[in-house]
Image: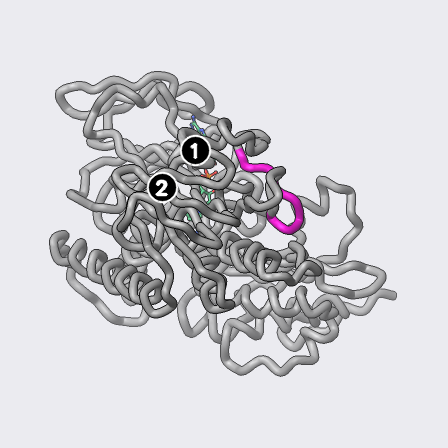
Amino acid sequence: MPDTHTTDLVVLGGGPGGYAAAFLAADRGVQTTLIDAAPKPGGTCLHFGCIPSKTLLHVAEIIHAAQDAAEFGLAFDKPKIDLAKLRAKGDKIVETMSAALLKGCKDRGITHIVGRGTFVDRNTIQVDKGPSVKFQKCILAVGSIPAQLPLFDIGSKRILDSTAALHVDSVPKSLLVVGGGYIGLELGSVYAALGSAVTVVEMTPTLLPGVDADLVRPLHARLRAQLEKIYLSTKVSKIEETKDGVKAHFEGEADIKDATYEKVLVAVGRRPNTSNIGLDKIGVEIERGYIKTDAQRRTNIPHIFAIGDAAGEPMLAHKAAHEGKLAVEIITGDNGSAWDVRAMPAVVFTDPEIAWCGLTETDAKKTNRVVKIGVFRWGFSGRASTLGRNDGLTKVIVDPTTDQVLGVGVVGHGAGELIAEAVVAIEMGATAKDLAMCVHPHPTLSETIGEAAELLHGLSSHVFMPKKK
Ligand code: NAD
């Protein structure tokens, strides 16, 4: 490639936000260049996040299903785990998907440049060991990186971040997971299923802080049985490497002061990857670490847009992809487009899964919004019973005056798949009555959404509601 490359649109970052934007732009006829430091697109989600973790969570699910099968009269031996084969399978999935993305670039005529890009001025990005890219428009899709706590920076190989933990070099006898959020609980569950004695330490009084308490409760109950210990309202105050492992000192409500673990996974959040790419040099406005954008994902520099983790929470791949497509719509002249998502879904892929979208009960309380909530417990679900998984609930949150569905929350087996119906309902302005009147197939877990909606009207086939006098 020559020293200088000229393009109409440059997308910096090839994760789910960046490649979705680049693909749509090219499909709409824009001459597009995609720059990413990795040889193949896919970003953190594909290479070190969603996809590798879901591969491992699938394995954990199989192990748990085999254990749970005992109540159906099936007995399996303890699984023999071939870590090399497990890693190879994970690598193959990532390799196949990233190769397809690379082909997607090629098929669309997108110039794909491998290297780290840094802004030289408002229309030029210099690629490390690559060309200088002159552009008309830019979409920043630079993602996020794991947050580091200086406390854990003791230069020990026993201290892992999520990227290292996803590689599963070995199954430690004991693992301390610092942070009871998405990553801590997903990966903690994986290691527990593989055979580690896992302890989770979370500094707030609940797991998954911010998520509705009734959704977290069934997960907490199951984790209590699967994990060694869960310490809430507790922090690690000091950490030191000893000959046996890593000694963690606790501060807070944990009933012990210190303990030694073979390995420690630090999962205390992620931060936007906005440093060292020259944003300060060209004057891109940053707010609390995130790139500041308007409802069209335009930064303070009109021809530069920002999407995904770097542009604000929630840090979710599907939010990034949606923003990427929005930015391309604006760039290609759909000036009426703007961010108007009512129901951003979130899924924690634990066992049971937790999923929600739209207004949560927690947010309704925080903003003093009056809502009506229909809660259907899965004890009454035929499908949940046949799966041996009655430990779920589905709730539908509505506006009490209009009956319009504002939010839905689900905890239980397959919650991540179930939430899609709720997203459509909210985005289409459905009422609880609409949801109740839609025929849900029997026996499926989707019926729980219909039943929760029916409960809002005092009518449910499976829950008797005494008439008010
Ligand atoms: P998180 O914000 O979900 O959880 C971090 C947790 O660490 C919080 O509960 C916090 O209270 C706790 N914590 C912070 N400092 C602590 C300390 N010193 N001691 C003990 N606990 C401490 O962050 P994460 O789990 O690292 O994930 C990062 C982001 O990645 C998430 O916010 C999410 O947006 C995204 N993610 C999404 C998925 C998914 O969609 N399924 C999966 C993984 C990650």
Residue found at x 45% / y 60%: 31
Residue 44 in view here: no
Q: Give SS at disc 2.
A: strand
Q: Which residues are magenta?
A: 290-297
- Residue denoted by label 2: 132
Q: Earlier in the sequence, mark 2 or mark 1?
A: 1
In the rendered image, the vertical position of residue 124 relative to residue 287, given as above or below: below
User: Of the numbered discs in the image, which one, if any, rests on residue 149?
Assistant: none
141 or 468: nearer the viewer: 141
In the rendered image, the vertical position of residue 228 relative to residue 348, given as above or below: above
Horizontal and vertical percent position of residue 59: 26, 59
Q: Is residue 10 left or right of residue 109?
A: right
What number of labels is visible?
Answer: 2
Q: For marks 2 and 1, give the CA distance.
A: 9 Å
Residue found at x 74% / y 66%: 456
Assess whether mark 1 and mark 2 are in contact (beta carbons under 8 angstroms).
yes
In the rendered image, the vertical position of residue 165 relative to residue 352, given as above or below: above
Horizontal and vertical percent position of residue 275: 43, 30
Task: Indicate the quadrant where residue 300 lies.
Answer: top right
In the rendered image, the vertical position of residue 333 relative to residue 207, given as above or below: below
- Residue denoted by label 1: 120
Residue 18 in view here: yes
95 or 419: nearer the viewer: 95
State yes or no: Cβ of the residue under disc 2 lies below 8 Å from any atom of ligand 1.
no
The three-letter code of the residue at mark 1 reads Val
Q: Main secondary structure of the magenta part?
A: loop
The three-letter code of the residue at mark 2 reads Ser
